[in-house]
Amino acid sequence: DQLIHGRVRLGIVSDLAVHESLSFGELKEMLETTDGNLSAHARKLEEGGYLACEKRFEGRVPLTTYRLTPLGREALARYLDHMEALIGQVRER
């Protein structure tokens, strides 16, 4: 799945697979990436239906949170199955 194959995108969906939701800041820290890079990759995943984004204010501070959609969970499961199959083939050789 080319939509989640890259390091940052795979990191986003992987982190969200084990957390119900994460804020933009939490993802940025976990992935050690820039605001612009994270924003661009998250937008692509959202456009693909893999992420849901919620924007709100806590007091006067904007807060963006993300969660993995059911489609995103299915895509990650397929991706992991494919990678496990590839690893198995390589180990057999």
Image (spheres, grey):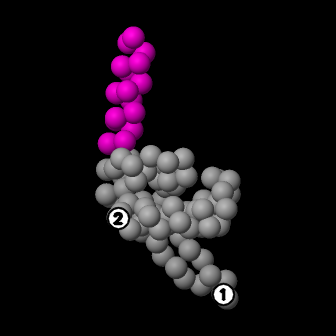
> Quick one: SS at disc 2?
loop
Q: Residue at x 58, y 62 (%)?
A: 38
Residue 33: give x, y in percent of width and height. Answer: 66, 57
Residue 41: give x, y in percent of width and height. Answer: 51, 61
Quadrant including the C terminus: top left
Q: Nearer the viewer, mark 2 or mark 1?
A: 2
In the image, residue 70 lies in the stretch drawn in magenta: no
Q: Residue at x 36, y 47 (%)?
A: 1
Distance, label 2 to label 1, CA atoms, is 29 Å
Q: Nearer the viewer, residue 28 or 68?
A: 28
> Quick one: SS at disc 1?
loop
- 44 shown above or below 77: below
Q: Residue at x 39, y 33 (%)?
A: 83
Q: Main secondary structure of the magenta part?
A: helix
Q: Nearer the viewer, residue 1 or 78?
A: 1
In the image, residue 83 lies in the stretch drawn in magenta: yes
Mark 1, residue position: 59
Mark 2, residue position: 49
- The reply to whether residue 23 is in sight is no
Residue 36: give x, y in percent of width and height. Answer: 62, 67
Amino acid under disc 1: Gly
Range drawn in magenta: 77-93
Q: Residue at x 50, y 64 (%)?
A: 42
